[in-house]
Amino acid sequence: MTENTRGAAQDRAEPVGVVGAGTMGVGVCQSLIQAGLDVVLVEPDARAADGARERLAQSLRLTRLLGRGPAEVGGRVQWAHSPEALDGVGFVVECAPENRDLKESLFAELDRICPPRAVFASCTSAIPIALLAARTSRPERVLGLHFMNPVPLKDTVEVVRAEATSQETMDRALALLGRLGKETVVVPDGPGFVLNRVLMLCIAQAAALVDEGAADGATVDAVFEKCLGHPMGPLRTADLIGLDNVMDTMAVLREQTGDDRYAAPPTFAALVADGHLGRKTGKGFHDYS
Ligand code: NAD
C-alpha cells in the first residue's frame, strides 16, 4: 500500500474530527454523516452543544423531508467536550471561532493528541494556514478547507494549500471532499486567501456607504442582486456569515495586511456590540424576525 492509499483507507475507516459546533462545525458534521462517515464533534461550551444538537437534528429532518438525505444517520456523531476525544481520528476539520491565538493553541493541542498521520484542516476565513501549521510538528499535513455557509448546500470549497502542505495531504483532503460531493478551487496561502481578501473589502465598503447615509442597506444589496444578479448583496452576505465573525475576519485581515480599509465602520461595530449578529440572532443589516 502506498502512503496515499493507506491515508485514504484510514480516512474511510476512522471517524473524522470536527472542532467547534457552531454554524460551520454543524454544517461540516452534517455533510460528513450524510456521506456515511462517523464524526467526533468537539464543543467545549455545554449550551452551544445543546443548541448544536438541536440544529443538526432539525437540519437532518428537513433534508430527509426534501428527499436529499439518507433515512438513518443516528449514532454517527460522538459528542465531546475536549479535543482529547480526537486521539483516534485521521482527519480533523477545525471550525473554532476566528481568533488567531485560540486557533494557534488548538493546533498545538491537536498535534499533541492526534495520531501522527492525522491531517489538520482549518475552516478559518482569513488566518494564514502557515501560522497554524507552525504550531504543529507536521506542517506538511496542514491545509485550509474554507467551506461555504450553509455547508450542506454549497457545492464548492476554497482549498488553501500552504507552502509546506504535501501532495499526499492534498490528495487526502480532495478525496474527502469528493466523498462529500464538493467541487474545489485550490488557492495559495495568505491573509483571507482569495475569497475573503476581496469579499471583506466589499462588505466594509458597503457598510461605510450605509454609515455615510449615502444609501440604505436594502438599496446597496438591491444593486448587487438586481443589477449583477448576485443571489445576495454584500450586507445580506455579512448577515448570513454572522456580523461577529465578519468583524473578527476583518480584524485578522487588518492585522495581517496593515490595510486600514478592513476596519469595520462604526455602525457595523455598534450592531455587533448590541448583539445584532445577522440571521442567527434575527437582526443585522436586515430584519429576519
Ligand atoms: P461560531 O461562532 O458559530 O462557532 C464556533 C464554535 O466554536 C462555538 O460553538 C464555540 O463555542 C466553539 N468553540 C469556542 N472555543 C473553542 C475551542 N477552544 N475548541 C472548540 N470549539 C470552540 O463560528 P462559525 O461561524 O461556525 O465559524 C467557525 C470558523 O469558520 C471561523 O474560523 C470562521 O471564520 C469560519 N467560517 C465561517 C463562515 C460563516 O459563514 N459563518 C464561513 C466560512 C468560514
Image: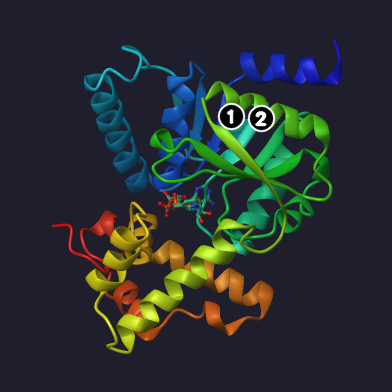
User: x, y (%) of residue 286?
Assistant: 22, 65
Corner quadrant of residue 245: bottom left
Corner quadrant of residue 139: top right
Question: Looking at the image, which is closer to me, 94 or 214?
Answer: 214
Mark 2 residue crowding within 10 angstroms, few (<14) / some (14–19) / many (20+): some
Mark 1 residue crowding within 10 angstroms, few (<14) / some (14–19) / many (20+): many
User: x, y (%) of residue 25?
Assistant: 46, 41
Q: Is residue 16 above or below residue 269?
A: above
Residue 127 makes an appearance in the image = yes
**What type is the residue that disc 2 sits on?**
Leu
Corner quadrant of residue 174: top right
Residue visible at 59% across and 24% down in the picture? 178
Give the distance between the C-alpha atoms of the residues marked 2 and 1, in whole angstroms: 5 Å
Residue visible at 27% across and 81% down in the picture? 215
What residue sits right under mark 1 in the picture? 177
Q: Is residue 94 above or below residue 178?
A: below
Residue visible at 24% across and 58% down in the picture? 281
Q: Is residue 282 left or right of residue 207?
A: left
Residue 22 makes an appearance in the image = no
User: x, y (%) of residue 191?
Assistant: 66, 64
**What type is the residue that disc 1 sits on?**
Leu
What residue sits right under mark 2 in the picture? 174
Q: Are marks 2 and 1 in contact (CB under 8 Å)?
A: yes
Q: Is residue 98 left or right of residue 227?
A: right
Q: Quadrant of the N terminus?
A: top right
